[in-house]
Amino acid sequence: MWTGYKTICVLAMLIAIGAASAPFDAFSGSPYTDFDTICTKDAGLRINEPVDDVSGYAIYPGEGEPSVEEIVSGHVSDAPALGGCFPCIEELVKNGYQYVEAFYVSAKDRRFSPFVEHQDYFVSKTGLYRYELIERDRGNNACGPFDRMLHESERLLDVNPAFVDTTMRRLALDYRAHSSQMEGKCVSVTSIDRFSAPYRIGKSREVIDRPDGAIIYRKRTFVESADGTVVAEGIFYSYYEQRPAHHIAIAERRCGSLILPPLTELLRPHSAHSDSSEAR
């Protein structure tokens, strides 16, 4: 009797362990119970230890944007994204990173949109680029594209500020804010064949179609190492009783968050790490 009871207990424990380790099935049970379980198990912010002495990072395309492979091959058209790190003054001067790598989609390959300025900045070819703050004596006209765009942004801002697109406006204003730190320097842009930064930032979206016609979106923002080790991530879920006809439709239920701490708190550039060490 006792042996049989022990066997039943052991079997029950093994079943419980198996259930806990099995992946969550988003299609079973009632929709709200499923959604609550998803929110409990997966949604929200996960912040791990910050990384010190980071020299730079790569900005990856997100869901709905061309892949890195498509961008490198040049097979991009009607893309919804601009990409790039323009003007990259805040990242390189204020934040203190040595470089930023980013994808860029040229105006001819972008979809016309009132929310994305339809002109080129620094370069006019879709591809991967590295942005760096360099000394002007490097030669080869490395500062030429920066100087031309800066001159144009300043001219437009002086002539008619109301008609300057937001990207050009930011170049002029960022330069004015940090010009004293940029004496003898400029932002250079170099074409690269692949990302080499040890860390990457980006966002993604997954769609869960339910048999009852409902749909769940899983959105994620992330900062991680090139090998996939997560430094920080924010996961957000939205639940619709039926597939929304428009992207601005209001979800029936939502949970989680996509808002991460400032990047310099997660990937601490060398200058910031040195300053905080000296302060202590």
Image (cartoon, rainbow, N blue to C red):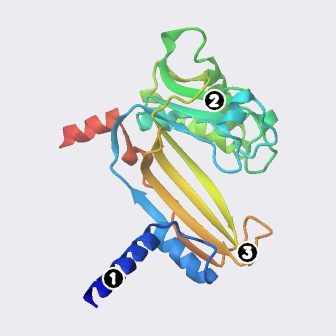
Which mark, residue 128?
A: 2
Name the secondary structure under disc 3. loop
The N terminus sits in image quarter: bottom left
Residue matched to label 3: 211
* Amino acid at circle 1: Cys
Tag 2: amino acid: Leu
Q: How far apart in space, not on screen, are marks 1 and 3 (Cα)?
A: 36 Å
User: How far across and how far down the image is residue 76, in percent?
Assistant: 78, 36
The mark lying in front, picked from 1 and 2, is 1
The kind of secondary structure element at disc 1 is: helix
Characterize the local packing of mark 2: few (<14), some (14-19) or many (20 or more) Cα atoms within 10 angstroms.
many
**Nearer the observer, disc 1 or disc 3?**
1
Q: Residue furthest left?
A: 280
- The answer to which quarter of the image holds residue 180 is top left
Q: Nearer the viewer, residue 72 or 269?
A: 72
Q: Earlier in the sequence, mark 1 or mark 2?
A: 1
Q: Residues within 10 Å of mark 3 (few under 14, many from 20)?
A: few
Residue 246 located left or right of residue 69? right
Crowding near pointer 1: few (<14 within 10 Å), some, many (20+)?
Answer: few
Task: Mark yes or no: residue 1 visible.
Answer: yes
Could you tell me which residue is drawn at 72 percent across and 67 percent down? Answer: 248
Asked if 89 appears above or below 250 in the picture, the reply is above
**Residue pointed to by mark 1:** 9
* Residue 158 visible, this angle: no
Q: CA distance from mark 3 to mark 2?
A: 40 Å
Image position of 235 (left or right of 252): left
Question: Relative to 240, does residue 264 appear above or below in the rendering?
Answer: above
Q: Compared with residue 147, is residue 228 higher up or lower down, i.e. above or below?
A: below
Quarter of the image holding residue 74? Answer: top right
- Which residue is found at the position 39% from the left and 56% from the top? 47
Q: Which numbered marker is on residue 188?
A: none
